[in-house]
Image (cartoon, helix red, strand yellow):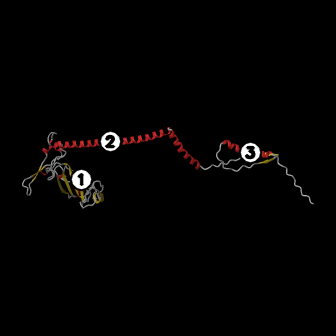
Amino acid sequence: MKLNIANPSHGRVKKFLIEEEQKIKLLHDHRIADEINGDNLGEQFKGYVFKITGGNDKDGFPMMQGVMTAERVRLLIGPQHSIYHEHRRQKRRSTRKRKSVRGCITSNDTSQINCVIVKKGAKDIPGLTDPESELPKLMGPKRASKIRKLWNLTKDEDPVKFVIKRSIPKKGKRKTDRVKAPKVQRLVTPHSLSRQRHKLAERKAAKDRSTEQKNAYEKMIAAKRDATRSKRLSKLSKRRDEPAGAAGAAKPAAAAAPKAAPKEAKQPAKTEKVEKPVKKVAEKGAKAAVAPAPAKAVEKKPAAEKAAKAAKPAKEAAKGAAKPAKKAEPKTAPKKK
């Protein structure tokens, strides 16, 4: 099994080959982000503590954090995962892909483990932790606040003068070395401050412009509303003033008369069934009944006339009942000659 150990402080990475089975077994069944004690791996790693950051299996498939298995699985991986890589010829961008991935637990199939030094031991590892192996940083800090922090500068001092520059040796046709300096970021200058003030002034002017337009629009709407209201009030006042004059009073009466006539004509004549009163008169044990009169269509008349008409048939019936009935004379047979 291969063990890749990285030293971030020196910027170095070194690979070690472990062939003993007992030491290899001690590296099994560990997850990513677990810490390993270096005393079990040999005397040169005595006192060191390593942290697992990843690894590969025998076929080169990488380990993935969060896949809680030691086997190889196929997963849909998107742009948010570190294993995902977009090809430049790919038509659809940011699409998920199904890829084979090794779980985050080390096993017998794991051929390489990547580690980082968490704690340094008593002895230096040659080519990894010794002072000679330390690589200088190519570029210094770029942000103004970090440059001030590095050199302990005050606000009055210019951080551009304290930028760490690097020289590129001459090459080809170039006869002299080339010096490169980073552009200081987030640097506060009079020009940047004036730009900020200009932006604020523009924003304020736009706000004032919008408020003026809003007020003008509200005034226009209020004027239109007042005009429509005044028109309605004038119409109402005219209607109220018209019936006060004589000519105005005659006109509505004449206009109302023809309208009322057709309404009466349209209404059909109502037929009312009037039943004449019946009186039972007893004479010599005989009872005479008077039949009711047939129903007739009666036009609307005053209540006094109706009552008089209804009383006439009753009186006539009473007179007829008072007269004595004539006795029928017996018929005599004609004499024979």
Q: Which residue is mark 2?
A: 216
Closer-to-camera residue (92/277) = 277
Q: Mark 1 is on which residue type?
A: Thr
Single out the residue that lies furthest toward the front: 247
Closer-to-camera residue (127/167) = 167
**Based on the displayed image, in which of its 4 quarters is residue 159 positioned?**
top left
Q: Mark 2 is on which residue type?
A: Ala
Q: Secondary structure at mark 1?
A: strand
Q: CA distance from mark 2 to mark 1?
A: 66 Å
Q: Position of residue 68 (x, y in %)?
A: 30, 55
Residue 189 in view (yes/no): no
Q: Position of residue 21 (x, y in %)?
A: 23, 58
Q: Position of residue 30 (x, y in %)?
A: 26, 54
Q: Which residue is mark 1?
A: 53
Q: Which residue is mark 3?
A: 314
Decide if residue 129 is on the left or right side of residue 27.
left
Q: Mark 3 is on which residue type?
A: Ala
Decide if residue 238 is on the left or right side of residue 138.
right
Single out the residue that lies furthest toward the top: 244
